[in-house]
Image (cartoon, helix red, strand yellow):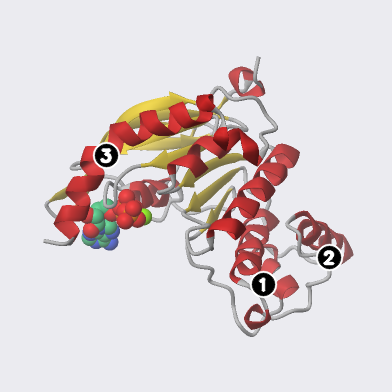
Amino acid sequence: MAPSELAPVKLSVSGLTKYFGDLEVLRDVSTDVRRGEFISIVGPSGCGKTTFLRIIGGLEQSESGEARLDERKISGPGKDRGFVFQQDNLLPWRTVRSNTEIGPEINGEKGPEQHHRIARLLKLVGLGGFEEYYPRQLSGGMRQRVNLARALAVDPDLLLMDEPFSALDAQTREIMQTELMRIWEEGRKTVLFVTHQIDEAVYLSDRVLVFARRPGRIQEVVEIDLPRPRPLSIKRTPHFVAYVDHIWKLIEDDVRASVMEEHA
Ligand SMILES: Nc1ncnc2c1ncn2[C@@H]1O[C@H](COP(=O)(O)OP(=O)(O)OP(=O)(O)O)[C@@H](O)[C@H]1O
Ligand SMILES: [Mg+2]
C-alpha cells in the first residue's frame, strides 16, 4: 500500500467558486489531498489553474467554499506554503545563497545552524559550489533550482508549483523532473504542481486533477498507479502512454476551443 493511502488529509478543498467580475473562473471545486501526496493539475489555458493555486496560497479569495490546511481555514499567505512560479523572480543583486535565504531572513531565522541548513538545501537541489554566484551567471535550469531551494528554505508543508519548468528546454526539463522526484522522495512534502505537459504530470504524480474550462472545474481525477522510483524510461512503457492518452482525450476538445479563442 502506498504511504499516501495511509496519510491523513493535509489539504481539504470544498465547493470553491471564484469570479473575476462577471467571469466565473472556478465552479464548485472540491478535493482532498493527503500528506505527502504529489498532485498535478492539468487543463486548457484559462481554466483557472493559477487562480486555484493562488487561492490555496492565500493570495486570492474565493466567493464561496473554502480550503483548509491541517483543518485550519486558509485566509491569507503563510509560511506553511511555498510557491514556485513559472518565471524565476530572483533578486539580481543577491547571490544564490542570499536569494535562498530570503524566506528564513523574513522569518527572523539566522545563525550558523541556518547557514548549514541552506548549504545542505543548495546541495540537495544540485547547486553545491554555486552558492556565491549571481543569477546572471546561471542557466535557466539553475535559476529554477534556486527558486525551488528558496521555496524549500522555509520548510513549507505544502509546495505550490505553477508551471515551474515551462521556460526550460526539453532536456533540462526532464532532468529537473527527475531531480524534483528525488527531492520529493527525500522530504515527502505535499505538492500541488500545475503543468501543461501531460507526460510531466503523469511522470511526477500520485494523482492528476484534470480541469475543464468555462467555468473551471475538476473533470476527472486520474490515479497514477505506476511504481516508484520512476526512471525516465517509464515514459515509453504502454502503461504510461495509456495514462497520457487518456488525459489528453479528456482535455483535447477544451484545449482546441481555448486555442481557437486565443486566435479569434
Ligand atoms: N486578476 C484577474 N482579474 C481578472 N481576471 C483574471 C485575473 N486573473 C485571472 N483572470 C481570468 O481568470 C481566468 C483563469 O485564469 P488563470 O490564470 O487561473 O488560468 P490558467 O488555467 O492558469 O491559464 P494558463 O494555463 O494560461 O496559465 C482567465 O480567463 C483569466 O483571464
Ligand atoms: Mg496559469
Please tell me whether mark 3 sits on a helix, a strand or a loop. Answer: helix
- Where is residue 188? Give x, y as percent: 68, 37
Q: Is mark 3 within 8 Å of ligand 1?
A: no
**Residue ID for mark 3:** 252
Measured Cα–Cα span from mark 3 to mark 2: 48 Å
Q: Which numbered disc, 1 or 2, marks the residue that appears first in the sequence? A: 1
Measured Cα–Cα span from mark 1 to mark 3: 40 Å
Q: Which numbered disc, 1 or 3, marks the residue that appears first in the sequence? A: 1
Front residue (pair 250, 185): 250
Query: Which amino acid type is shown beneath numbered disc 3?
Result: Glu
Q: Kindly identify the residue that appears in the image at 66 percent across and 67 percent down.
A: 142
Q: Kindly identify the residue that appears in the image at 39 percent across and 42 percent down.
A: 42
Front residue (pair 235, 94): 235
Q: Is residue 191 left or right of residue 42?
A: right
Residue at the top extreme of this rendering? 1
**Residue ID for mark 2:** 115
**Residue ID for mark 1:** 99
Q: Is mark 2 within 8 Å of ligand 2?
A: no
Instruction: Locate ligand 1 by image quadrant.
Output: bottom left
Q: Is residue 41 left or right of residue 154?
A: left
Image quarter in which the N terminus is found = top right
* Proximity of marks 3 and 2: CB atoms separated by less than 8 Å: no
Front residue (pair 169, 151): 169
User: Which quarter of the picture shows residue 64?
Assistant: top left
* Proximity of marks 1 and 2: CB atoms separated by less than 8 Å: no
Image position of 103 with respect to 69: above or below: below
Q: Of circles 1 and 2, which is in front?
A: 1
Q: Kindly identify the residue that appears in the image at 40 percent across and 49 percent down.
A: 196
Measured Cα–Cα span from mark 1 to mark 2: 13 Å
- Where is residue 220? Give x, y as percent: 34, 27
In this orientation, does residue 26 appear? no
Residue at the bottom extreme of this rendering? 93
